[in-house]
Image (cartoon, grey):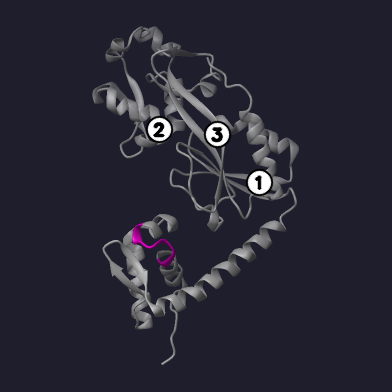
Amino acid sequence: MAIKFDDWQDVKVAFEVARRGTLTAAAEVLNVHHSTVLRRINSLEKNLDTRLFHRHARGYKVTEIGAKLFTTAQTIDSSLEQLHNNIAAADSTLRGSLLLTTVSGFMDVLGDVCEELQALHPQVQLEVILEQKRLRLDHGQAHIAVRAGPRPDEGDYIAQHLTQLTSSLYANKRYINKYGTPKTLSDLQHHNFVSGVAGFNARVPYFEWADKHIPAQQIKLRVSETSEATRAIIKGLGIGGLQHGVAAQYNDLVPILHSELSWPTDVWLVTHHLVHRTAKVQAFAGLLKAHFNKPQTLK
């Protein structure tokens, strides 16, 4: 009976397990749950009516039959990568769509760079995807990522340090006129705060700090997007953390206890090696680097 592959994605998933050695490692690379990886392996083995892996407590080791299949898969993977590389290398024109992925709130930081790109390269259409979930650059979901936090460590990605942005507490003058200015850390117990919703806060240093140090009853507003937290603070709905460069854009904001509280965050420019040298990516990357080489405004 002829062997039929019902779903080539099963082969890709199993190939990643063979490369990484564990379900968890493969799941992280593929950005799926480990149960999905296990289901696809089981499906492929059932379809082929053969065992592709020896299961061990420390991971998965390919069988002899599995090794033959994954040798072919490696050839296919290399061919597809070369095709991707050839297509990317041909993209030497400064026109068409450029996909940038970052998180909510960063448009306040990147707005000037976007404006420069429009002025210098009007044939390029920038598409900004605001997504807390990290998009897969190797799958073409975006050309460039601007990420905050620890250095990205995906093997095929190129991560360049752009800057370190610092946030501190701010409040609108209307709030200050109504509730007064906190002069000490202990004074904060008498004030209202804006923060993030549960499950999101660990990604934003100020939100994480507020969860640990500010009683829940004092957090009068929680949002799932940092951009909306910024707007709430600007509207005078409470004290909250803002990046200095963002706060400097609003004359009605007052700094709160800057010498006592601040939260630095590293910012990274991330590209995939197959599109790193393309004209559009290099043009925007150059503007980003030049922008972040300017001194950060401290209000």
Q: Nearer the viewer, mark 3 or mark 1?
A: 1
Say if the magenta span includes residue 19. yes
Of marks 2 and 1, which one's residue comes earlier in the chain? 2
| Residue drawn where x is 35% and y is 28% of the image | 195
Q: Which mark is residue 281?
A: 1
Residue at 46%, 77% in the rendered image:
69
Q: CA distance from mark 2 to mark 1?
A: 27 Å
Looking at the rendered structure, the secondary structure element under dot 3 is: helix
The residue at the far bottom in this view is 1
Q: Which residue is mark 2?
A: 204
Label the magenta part by its dominant secondary structure.
Answer: helix
Q: Which residue is mark 3?
A: 107
| 235 is higher (above) or lower (below) than 86 | above
Badge 2 crowding class, 10 Å Cα cut-off, few under 14, some 14 to 19, many 20 or more, is some
- Tag 3: Cα neighbours inside 10 Å, few (<14), some, or many (≥20)? some
Chain-order first, disc 3 or disc 1: 3
Q: CA distance from mark 2 to mark 3?
A: 16 Å
Within the magenta stretch, is there residue 128?
A: no
What residue range appears in magenta?
Answer: 18-24
Q: Horizontal placement of 109 versus 95: left or right?
A: left
Q: Is residue 85 visible?
A: yes
Residue 268, position as x, y percentages in the image = 54, 38
> From what the image shows, is residue 165 above or below residue 138?
above
Q: Amino acid at mark 3?
A: Met
